[in-house]
Amino acid sequence: MEKSEDILVVERLKKYFKTSFGVVKAVDDISFNVRYGEIFALVGESGSGKSTTGFTIAGVYVPTSGKIIYKGEDITMHVKKRPMRLKRDIQMVFQDPGSSLNPRMVVRDVVGLPLMVHEKIRDKAVLEERVAELLKMVGLPPEDFMYRFPRELGGGEKQLVAIARALATRPSFVILDESTSALDVSMQAIVLRTLLRIQRELNLSYLLITHDLGVVRNVASRVAIMYLGKIYEIGPTVDFFQKPLHPYTQMLLSAIPVMSDEEEKLKPKGIKSVGEIPSAINPPPGCRFHTRCPYATDVCKTKEPEFIEVGRGHWVACHMCSKA
């Protein structure tokens, strides 16, 4: 694929944290790309490193090593002190809107702060007009929400305010870190529909970080499966659900709740969700999933698998697949 098709390229990214117990290898040598106008999903269990990946791309964390290339520019060295233009163009919507919104600020000030910082808007009337436009964009009537405090909002309403704030800088790339996981099912649907509509209208690129495979199936075009700091499978969403190859991918799919016998028949057979993700301080040697994999052999316990392309754009790192 030509680099010009990619808004983001991550190359051999690592993010380690030093603790009193040892070095946490939260993100350990991962590579992937996100295309212009694409919704790319990064999927895995809690502790897999997917949120750390998002925070590192957003500039919250400084990478241990590797490259982050955005719109053809290497921005890795800018992470410690990113230019304002990059802060404007790369935005993030966090998992818990309750903790990401200042409880002492009304909605007008929450959404208006990026406008004041990045566009230097000081005129009150102009500021309120812009905030009103953003609130309408996410489906919140300005006359009802402009002067409310976060404590006066429901969970879904808070998340819509957080999305409006992210859109205030007119970004091209938005990182969605479990943005619907804290919401009830009805509000999840409203927020997702809003995000999809905005993505189409503004031609945004999304990095969708989630553990919800139902969301992935409905909105993402490509998926990367992350486990204990590494990516083990990456490919089109259709292939992910119809032809899952890595045992961890199969395990995730086998754990999806179903409502009918027909849906049950579509789930991978022969592998169940067992065990817990090991510690990132002392990850297993070889394939890190081998401690939970029913197909593991001696080579899986000692040698790290290499990525191989098994179909167009479908890559997997598994010794079992490399022998097929």
Image: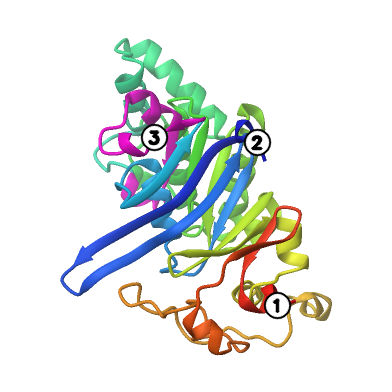
Q: Nearer the viewer, mark 1 or mark 2?
A: 1
Q: Earlier along the polypeptide chain: callout 2 or callout 3?
A: 2
Residue 2: mark: 2
Tell me the kind of residue under disc 2: Glu
57 lies above or below 31? above
Confirm or deny contact between disc 2 and disc 3 (CB under 8 A). Answer: no
Q: Nearer the viewer, mark 2 or mark 3?
A: 2
As measured in the structure, the alpha-carbon distance from the residue carrying label 1 to the one carrying label 2 is 29 Å
Point out residue 114 in the picture as x, y percentages from the top left corner: 35, 26
Mark 3 highlights which residue? 75
Magenta span of residues: 72-100
Residue 43: mark: none
**Left or right of residue 5, residue 278 in this image:** left
Task: Give the residue at x 64% y 65%.
Answer: 316
Secondary structure at badge 2 equals loop
The C terminus lies in quadrant: bottom right
Secondary structure at badge 3 equals loop
The image quarter containing residue 124 is top left
Question: Which one is nearer the viewer's eye here, 146 or 119?
Answer: 119
Point out residue 76 in the picture as x, y percentages from the top left corner: 36, 39
Q: In this orientation, does residue 101 appear?
A: yes
Q: Earlier along the polypeptide chain: callout 1 or callout 3?
A: 3
Q: Is residue 173 magenta?
A: no
